[in-house]
Image (tube, rainbow, N blue to C red):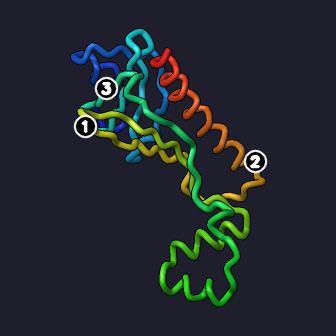
Amino acid sequence: MGLFSKKVPQQAFDALGFTITDTLLDPPRFTFLPSIYQDAEHAKWAVKYRGAEPAVFGYADILQCEVVESGNAEEAGKVSNQELAHQIIANPSKAARINAAKRDMCLGMGVVVAVRTGEGEVSKLEIPVMTDEVKRDSALYRSYRSVAEDLAGKFNAMMEQARS
């Protein structure tokens, strides 16, 4: 198989009894993002990183799912210019978040899914949707937000189906 040939995703799941009925996330090539698939017939979903074995979960393994953003207005608070100068020296990333929040910018957005991974173990699957600085009142922000809410909605629907 060549470097640019398209693999058939189902082949990775044949031995696991998992049938892909829906692709929740199909990331661009040459990224480190996972592919996320759903098997609606068996109430399962799976995460597959390139070059790794897939991890299969049941709908009941989803504990919580939410859209998260970086650069919230609450982070800015009331910070004087002198305090901001001290923050830049002490913690540049926090200063960038404060400055972005003052300008109503979103520094990043993603979907965080809390998943039961074993006996009493919980892991968080963090799926980045946007990693650029985007103005919150822009069409691009609304587009990213729509994608994130759609993905979170699919996980929440699976979680609700498992509880009913």
**Residue drawn where x is 72% and y is 55% of the image:** 136
Q: Looking at the picture, does residue 92 appear above or below residue 138?
A: below
Q: What residue type is labelled 2?
A: Ala
Instruction: Decide which of tag 1 and tag 2 comes sooner along the chain.
Output: 1
Please, what is the three-letter code of the amino acid marked with disc 1? Ala
Q: Which of 73 and 51 is in front in this view?
A: 73
Q: Which residue has dot 2 on it?
A: 139
Mark 3 lies on a secondary structure that is: strand
Q: Is residue 90 above or below residue 127?
A: below
Residue named by callout 3: 56
The residue that appears at 24% across and 18% down in the rendered structure is 16
The part of the image, by quadrant, that contains residue 123 is: top left
> Looking at the figure, which quarter contains the N terminus?
top left
Type of amino acid at the residue the image marks with label 3 = Val
Left or right of residue 108: residue 38: left
Q: Quadrant of residue 142?
A: top right
Which label sits on residue 52? 1
Residue 57: give x, y in percent of width and height: 34, 26
For marks 2 and 3 on the same chain, the one whose residue lies earlier in the sequence: 3
